Image (cartoon, helix red, strand yellow):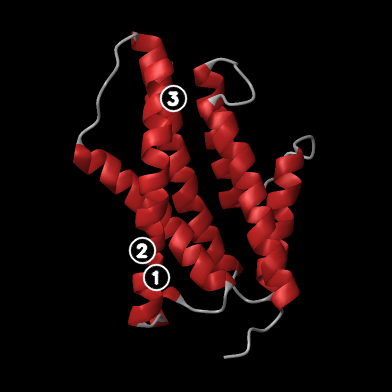
Amino acid sequence: MKLENPAERIKILLNTYIFFRIDDDKADGEFESGNPQERLEYVISRMDATRLSKWDTNRAVDSITSEVLELASKVGIEKELRKCLLIIFESLVFDAKRINDYRESGKREFLSRFSLVDNYFRLDSLGTGQAMMLIFGDRPEEASPETINACVDFSDAVSISYTPRDLIEDIRS
C-alpha cells in the first residue's frame, strides 16, 4: 500500500508528539511547579480547545495543535484524529486530577489495577494506537488483525516502560 501525503503525515505525527509532551509535562508539573489545580484546569482547557477548535493565540501549543488538525483535514483524517486526541486528553485529565486530589487531601490514594489498566488502555490502545493507525493510512475499523496486534503490543510496551518511571515519581512527590 502506498501511503498518500507522507510528508504531511510525518509532520502530523511529530507535532502531535510535541504538543502532547508539552501538555503531559505541564499536567504532571515537570517543567512548571505551579498549583495542581491550575495544571488540571490547563489540561481541561487544552481538551476543550481541541474539541471546539477555539485556540488561545497566546499559547504556542494551541498553534501546533491547530496546525496538526489542519494537516489532518488535508489528508482526510481530521474528524477521526480529533476523537483520538480527545481520548488522550482524557487520560491526561485523569493523571492531573489524581495529582490534584493528592495535593488537596494530603492522602496518597493507590488506584485499583482496573483503574490504571483502563487509563492506560484509553491512552495507549484507543488514543495513541488509533491515532497512529490513522496517521499511517489505516482506518481503525478496517484494520487488519496484524495491525491491531501491533498496536496492542505497542500499548503494552508503553505501559511497561512508563509504570516504573511513574511509580518512582509518585513516591518522590
Q: Amino acid at mark 1?
A: Ala
- Contact between marks 2 and 1 (CB within 8 A): the answer is yes
Per the model, the C-alpha gap separating discs 1 and 3 is 29 Å
Report x, y in % for residue 125: 38, 59
Res 104 visible: yes
Distance from Cα at disc 2 to Cα at disc 1: 5 Å
Q: Secondary structure at mark 1?
A: helix
Dot 2 surroundings within 10 Å: few (below 14), some, or many (20 or more)?
some
Q: Taking 65 as reference, is 140 left or right?
A: left
Residue denoted by label 2: 153
User: Which residue is painted at 60% across and 49% down in the image?
Assistant: 50
Image: 144 above or below 64: below
Q: Secondary structure at mark 3?
A: helix
- Secondary structure found at label 2: helix
On the image, numbered disc 1 is attached to which residue?
Answer: 150
The residue that appears at 62% across and 89% down in the rendered structure is 2
Type of residue at label 2? Asp
The disc at residue 169 is 3
Residue 99 picture location, percent across and down: 42, 23
Is 112 positioned to the left or the right of 116 in the image? left
Q: Nearer the viewer, residue 47 or 11?
A: 11
The N terminus lies in quadrant: bottom right
Under mark 3, the amino acid is Glu
Position of residue 101 in the picture relative to residue 48 (left or right): left
